[in-house]
Image (cartoon, rainbow, N blue to C red):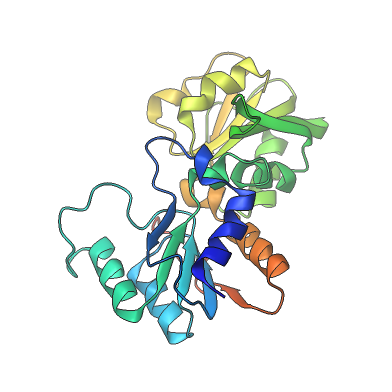
């Protein structure tokens, strides 16, 4: 097996051509011709994840967030990104990221959230010409009041806490969502007729919502982490006898702590 075999399987699902212009999805460390004996799937390519891959004999890492995002001016072990790059190169580990590519396919980040909530007839929220795009919107199986809906979201997404705008005094029936930072799509959610919009990284002023609409901030990590299971399942189905595993510390890798 070579790196290009793994990347080809991922890109059949989430093509690099659809990534956002500011993104850096794709192969970030290593060569497409590099031989691979095992793949470790994680959320962020931290030094700890590289150590886990090396200890397990995995020579390729696949993550959601890109290890190299902006321009690197120096690679130093004093910086977490630099340390991860140094460790990956030293261990001969290739690193690949499926970021906005996995955000923009309906089987990816937001579609996974929609399925977890049991939404019916869900579609892309901010649809582009080729049918892909950010976010998802659909209908609940049954309408529910706002308090019950908040509890339902927390239960279905495994949350201990959620930040919400003032709960609605009407039933929630149509729901929009976007994994990760999604406040830029609040207007799209309202245009789509949603009574509630779920995403992460909502700023203070966005909680002042118009009548008949509410927002729920579930956290950046919490809205996207299930893409790791999607990528794992994709690779396991494509290569059933190949060594693919998800990080044992995935759920503990959230850099945000709640007290």
Q: Residue at x 54, y 50 (%)?
A: 224
Residue 128 drawn above or below residue 47: above
**Observer able to see residue 258:** no
Horizontal relation, residue 210 to residue 23: left or right? right
Residue 44 percent location from the top left of the image: 42, 60
Residue 229 percent location from the top left of the image: 63, 61
- Foreground residue among 142 and 125: 125
Q: Quadrant of the C terminus?
A: bottom left
Q: Quadrant of residue 77?
A: bottom left
Q: Quadrant of residue 152?
A: top right
Residue 42 percent location from the top left of the image: 50, 65
Residue 120 percent location from the top left of the image: 81, 35
- Foreground residue among 215 and 54: 54
Name the residue furthest front: 33
Q: Residue at x 78, y 43 (%)?
A: 118
- Foreground residue among 138 and 143: 138
Q: Quadrant of the N terminus?
A: bottom right
Horizontal relation, residue 165 to residue 157: left or right? left
Count of numbered circles in the view = 0
Q: Residue at x 75, y 24 (%)?
A: 171
- Foreground residue among 161 and 38: 38
**Observer able to see residue 36:** yes
Q: Residue at x 46, y 69 (%)?
A: 33
């Amino acid at each position: 097996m070579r790196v290009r075999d793994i990347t080809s399987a991922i890109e059949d699902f989430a093509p690099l051509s659809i990534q956002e212009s500011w993104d850096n999805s794709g192969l970030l460390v290593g060569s497409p011709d590099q031989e691979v004996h095992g793949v470790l799937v994680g959320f962020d390519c931290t030094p700890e994840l590289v150590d886990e891959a090396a200890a397990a004999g995995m020579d390729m890492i696949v993550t959601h967030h890109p290890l190299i995002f902006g321009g690197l001016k120096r690679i130093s072990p004093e910086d977490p990104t630099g340390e991860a790059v140094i460790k990956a190169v030293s261990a001969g580990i290739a690193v690949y990221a499926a970021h906005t590519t996995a955000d923009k396919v309906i089987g990816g980040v937001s579609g996974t959230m929609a399925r977890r909530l049991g939404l019916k007839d869900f579609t892309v929220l901010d649809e582009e010409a080729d049918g892909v795009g950010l976010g998802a919107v659909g209908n609940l199986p049954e309408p529910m009041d706002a308090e019950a809906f908040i509890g339902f979201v927390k239960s279905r997404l495994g949350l201990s806490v959620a930040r919400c705008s003032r709960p609605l005094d009407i039933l929630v029936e149509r729901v929009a969502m976007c994994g990760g930072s999604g406040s830029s799509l609040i207007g799209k959610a309202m245009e789509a007729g949603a009574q509630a919009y779920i995403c992460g990284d909502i700023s203070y002023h966005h909680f002042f919502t118009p009548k008949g609409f509410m927002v729920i901030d579930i956290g950046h990590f919490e809205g996207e982490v299930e893409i790791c299971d999607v990528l794992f399942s994709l690779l396991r189905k494509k290569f059933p006898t190949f060594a693919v595993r998800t990080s044992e510390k995935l759920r503990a890798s959230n850099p945000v702590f709640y007290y």
